[in-house]
Image (spheres, coloured by chain):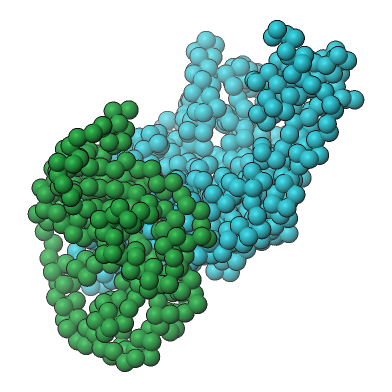
Amino acid sequence: MTGIRGRTSNWPAVLRVSEEYTMSAEVNFFIDDKPVQARAGEKILWAALDNGIEIPHLCAEREREEPFGACRLCFVEVEGRDLPVLSCSEPVAAGMRVHTRSERVDRLRRTAFELLMSHHDLDCKNCARNRSCALQKLAGTLKVSLRPKRFRKLPTEAPVDDSHAAIVLNPNRCILCGKCVWVCNQAGRSGVLDFVFRGLRTRVAPFRLEPLGDSECDDCMRCVDSCPVGALTRKKDPAESTSGPPGPLEQQQKA
Amino acid sequence: MDAKESDRGGRVREAYALLRQGAVDRCEAEAKDQLPIIQVGTATCGRAAGALETLAAIREELDARDMAGRVVEVGCNGHCYAEPLVTIHKEGWPPILYGTVNPGIAKVLIQRFLGEDDPCFEYLLGGLEPHEIVPALKDFPRSAHEHRSLLKHCGVIDPEDFDGAVRAGVYGGLARALRMDPEEVIEEIKRSKLKGLGGAGFETWRKWQACRQSPGPEKIVICNADEGDPGAFMDRSLLEGDPHSILEGMAICAWAVGASIGKIYVRAEYPLAVERVRKAIGQAEEAGLLGENILGSGLGLRLEVFEAAGAFVCGEETALIASIEGRRGMPRLRPPYPADRGLYGRPTVINNVKTFASVQRILEEGWEAFERLGVGSTRGTTVFALAGKVMNTGLVEVPMGTSLRQLVFEMGGGIPDGKRFKAVQIGGPSGGCLPESLLDTPIGFKSLREAGAMMGSGGMVVLDEGNCMVETARFFLDFTQKESCGKCTFCRIGTQQMLVILEDICRGEGSMEQLDLLESLAEDIRLGSLCNLGKTAPNPILTTIRHFRDEYEAHVLEKRCPAKVCTALTAHYILPDKCERSCDACVGSCPTEAIWVNAKRIKVIDQALCIQCGACVDACPPQYQAVVRISPLADLPDRGEQPKQEKGDDEG
Ligand SMILES: Cc1cc2nc3c(=O)[nH]c(=O)nc-3n(C[C@H](O)[C@H](O)[C@H](O)COP(=O)(O)O)c2cc1C
Ligand code: SF4
Ligand code: SF4
Ligand code: FES
């Protein structure tokens, strides 16, 4: 029997051919009663955006073959389906009737957003992403304050990693959209970033919790570019951070 | 085609007949001497209760008395409340099961039963076959509903004895399956109505069919033995007590779906299971039941154990796959389902240990026998790990459709210490708490879901009047929050927000608005989470709010914990007219020295020092029962006594 890794099977290629074949066709369907067209197999979210219809989303990436599906903001209703549907992962189908708003999805979106904000170190004034932040934009779209009152503010006490010459990683601003991890682990990149810990403590960090500055990071800066919020940012002045007492990450590592 | 098929059938029939005859012959040759057989349950649960010491004592005693007997290690038979368990087979007697056999009792059994033919009625749990004077285990209330099918070999056969397993019928199902076409095997499973026993209750045949029809030459079958639910150990018991049945079930599945590779994903915390499964794989390969051309059928299957260092969430099938692939155990969106794109992108079937055991039984005994048990859409049997406030803890196997009441009161023997039943928590950490009024719910995937609980992996914790339902919900939620993979917003942050509210309520700092928020957030998390960990995490909260709302309201509105459990709302108090002047048992028991003696020699608790540990309640002799718990704190009598002064004297 040939081992699983030992043999290059040809079926994924076969599958891909058939996917391409089905995807090349265009289908007609409706979003909020507006007739729209998209490639068969396209995800509802991208079809909507291409047609100028906004659906809130934070973690979706068009190039990503397997949608991550973590932020849970992009829910829509599809007629005939009992439960709200995740638009970043649901392919369109001919005749499908999508509704981007309903009492239920509005409520889910709002809760998801408020939950994210309840565990976010909100300090726009001092954040490099002020005015270009996805959260600020979303607050506008959803008409929800950046400081929602419904949930208690949970402590954000993760150590800020400023060990890298050009990058600052502040997990307390991270919304765990996973974009940086994805770009960092694409073929040919350094594969430094991953998720660590579980539960509320989950965060993005370099492999084995190394300081980013000591890691295999090849300074491609793609993670910074992919981050929709102020969690991964460019250092303003590289000289700034080399002075001063050791950051909390280093202390933690020594402990 | 037909001729070819029958060729295969003939080859398989012959190969199996030969194999079985050899095994039976070897077993019989061994049994010829008619030596008594002493079986000791040395699964993990037995070992925890000292089974290895018992085993050693038996061997020692036989040696010391120069008596002959065959000492055999077997798996767990489910009577965990009475470990260590010993079964003695002796000529002229039915096999007799003895409970709580410590080394002392073991020696007595050797001496009196083997030596003097006295079956020691004081230690026996029952005979395993009918007999005139030995009461049969079957006649006990526990056995009235018990139906041992999945567990039928556990505690009966020696899990390391391949011949014994084959003689008991293991691999007979595979031999039958290999004579059938794969489609016929799937049809057989379909007729049995088997649903996966890993929690979700998905129809097994559908999964197999999807995998079979999925394109791709190298399919994979995975046995999910992650079993991360605290308190659950049925999968472990099966792997430790009857590993060959699981391997056989996987081989049947491999034949049906066309897989050539199999993985058994076992928690690393189960070293004995890993060891026994590895040994069983070796034996099966040697006998031609795994590896190339199994029983001459052309089926090739390589099985290996994957030791999971994983977390609870790694039991979720897509996280499990990620974990085997060396990635972080994080669930991903489905579809694609593993049947289409599973391990290494190959079509993969993932089933639970009990599901594979069921498959073995169905192929060995035919779908009719399986389908006959159970009700509605849920057939066959299932295994529960009974725990908590119930007399007989341990594993029980019952037909689907048995009621919770029968399980708790008849098989479990009811609630100890004359306490009142309050609820039963079913389905593991994200199961639901069902009250007395729902005790007649029959066990089944649909019925339990409708009641707000779930089958889960078969954990069942019985709660009595001494359990606080708010605290219970908090306890389970604390587990799921810590085990959340952290990927999606609702589960990662939402469960923490629920936890914060529950902690407030337990401290008496909750409000009715928070209670409403808790309920609505629970609904959102259920709807919005990515995987079933998040989707089911609110179950304990939603069911306790639904069935025990009065307890929540007592915490919120009266700052009272009705079960007197929540420490912030409860005080310990010594009733002056019950306290015995000459006794000071409680004084020394208190770890914080909060108990002082007043001028009348009555003991008094200094509330400022008390940490609510309850040591004094246990220390106070039963004839006085002078220490009570009081909730709300407002009900604490103020006796106007000043402990500080007396203490001050001592210190000064
Ligand atoms: C958080 C989580 C933990 C799980 N743990 C287990 C487990 O320990 N064992 C198991 O068989 N299934 C577990 N499951 C269910 C599996 O995802 C999957 O449904 C199951 O293994 C399928 O087998 P079945 O069809 O035989 O039930 C878990 C699911 C979730 C969401
Ligand atoms: S650091 Fe930025 S890109 Fe990375 S997961 Fe967090 S929010 Fe997303
Ligand atoms: S529901 Fe929880 S465990 Fe499941 S993907 Fe989301 S965060 Fe992870
Ligand atoms: S965009 Fe769909 S879940 Fe994040």
**Would you place residue B572 above or below residue A114 in this image?**
above
Point out the image quarter for the C terminus of chain B.
top right
Give percent across and percent down for residue B92.
62, 31
Q: Of B604 and B170, which appears nearest the observer?
A: B604
- Is residue A207 toward the left or the right of residue B501 in the image? left
- Is residue A193 toward the left or the right of residue B434 in the image? left
Residue at 69% across, 52% down? B556
Quarter of the rendering containing residue B574 = top right
Q: Of B352 and B484, which appears nearest the observer?
A: B484
Q: Of B10 and B52, which appears nearest the observer?
A: B52
What is chain A's hue in the picture? Answer: green
* Furthest residue toward front: A125
Residue at 25% across, 88% down? A37
Give percent across and percent down for residue B297.
25, 58
Residue at 45% across, 41% down? B236
Point out the image quarter for the N terminus of chain B.
bottom left
Label the cyan chain with its letter: B
The answer to whether any part of residue B12 appears in the image is: no
Give percent across and percent down for residue B551.
71, 52
Q: How many marks?
A: 0
The answer to whether any part of residue A235 appears in the image is: yes
**Would you place residue B382 above or below residue A98 in this image?**
above
Give percent across and percent down for residue B184.
36, 69
**Would you place residue B442 above or below residue B503 in this image?**
below
Residue at 79% across, 21% down? B642
- Is residue B329 toward the left or the right of residue A26 in the image? right
